[in-house]
Image (cartoon, rainbow, N blue to C red):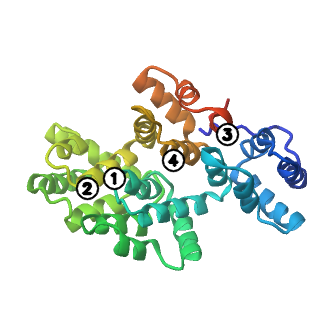
Amino acid sequence: MATLTVPQEVPSPTQDSETLRKAFKGWGTDEKAVIQVLAHRNATQRKIIRDTYQQLYNQSLIDSLDSELSGDFGRAVILWTYDPAERDARLVNKALKSKNKSLDKLKVIIEVSCASSPHHLLAVRKCYCSLFECSIEEDIIVNAPPSVRKILGCLVSSFRFDGAVVDLDVADDEASKLQEAVKLKQLDQDIVMWILSTRNVFQLKATFESYHKKYGFLLHEDIKDYSNDLLVSLVIIVIKCIISPERHFVEVIKAATDGWGTDEDALTRAIISRAEIDLIKVKKAYLDMHKTSLDKLVKDETSADYGAFLMALLGQ
């Protein structure tokens, strides 16, 4: 369900590296050439291009992009060019090291933990250790607000079973346990953390459905009104990411583009992180929810090379 388009006949990594090198030469940068190459190569191809560029010119492609490109366009291209695991490790680190540990910052950790495969999360954790010489869990303990350290630590350290195994009796039992925690307004209970961080996605969906049938409310609706607490907000995002990652990212994009200004970092993150996964689903969900196309929104909210790059990732 990716929107990324790769040509049927892909130039060799050497040819792509030469095209990029040529785009960097002279007084100005050929941004169109950069888009033509990098916005139409998958993660494996981009890695080979990075390696080939380093071998040919004894210079990092990321460093070259950083010196030649600027602004939202430069940040977007560099984020895309990273290996996906490195990209997400850097996004998590940026969120944890930001001075403002707001919901908008911390939701990145939920996205990486709950809207990605267990294998990708494991790769992110390994990459994080390599890049920053500590684990994500260590940085969460040092940098995250105390009220959400437990849930964030549980989520990033889990390895869910990646299969469609469901036990309906367990779903009913754990729906009851979740309802008890909701009634007591104690979402930080160990059992809540354990259920949300260890059960496979299909089992959790069954549990959330059981909750709805037994108590008449969706779980995230049952808790959203009783507190503005950061933990409650993060639990709601966990539930939404598990039920429908595409609808979560529609909300991210909508929030990024509402109002007078555009949050380019959030818009970039949403499109880049899903372009090779399920951006077609995100586009369909956006159309269903807002009766207009995501392509039109991005075209209206962006411009110049930055807009052209995002539109390329959207499949245009």
Q: Residue furthest front?
A: 27
Mark 3 vs mark 4: give the one in front: 4
Q: Distance between the residues labelled 3 and 1?
A: 29 Å
* Amino acid type at mark 1: Leu
Q: Which numbered marker is on residue 261?
A: none
Please say if 59 is above or below 205: below
Q: Distance between the residues labelled 3 and 4?
A: 20 Å
Q: Which numbered marker is on residue 4?
A: 3
* Amino acid type at mark 4: Asp
Query: What residue do we see at 50% from left, 28% from top?
Result: 284
Q: Quadrant of the N terminus?
A: top right
Q: Distance between the residues labelled 2 and 1?
A: 7 Å
- Mark 4, other Cα within 10 Å: few <14 / some 14–19 / many ≥20: few
Circle 4 residue = 265
The spot of residue 227 in percent (x, y) is 16, 49
Mark 2 vs mark 4: give the one in front: 4
Locate residue 39 relative to residue 206 in the image: left or right. right
The spot of residue 12 in percent (x, y) is 89, 51
* Amino acid type at mark 3: Leu
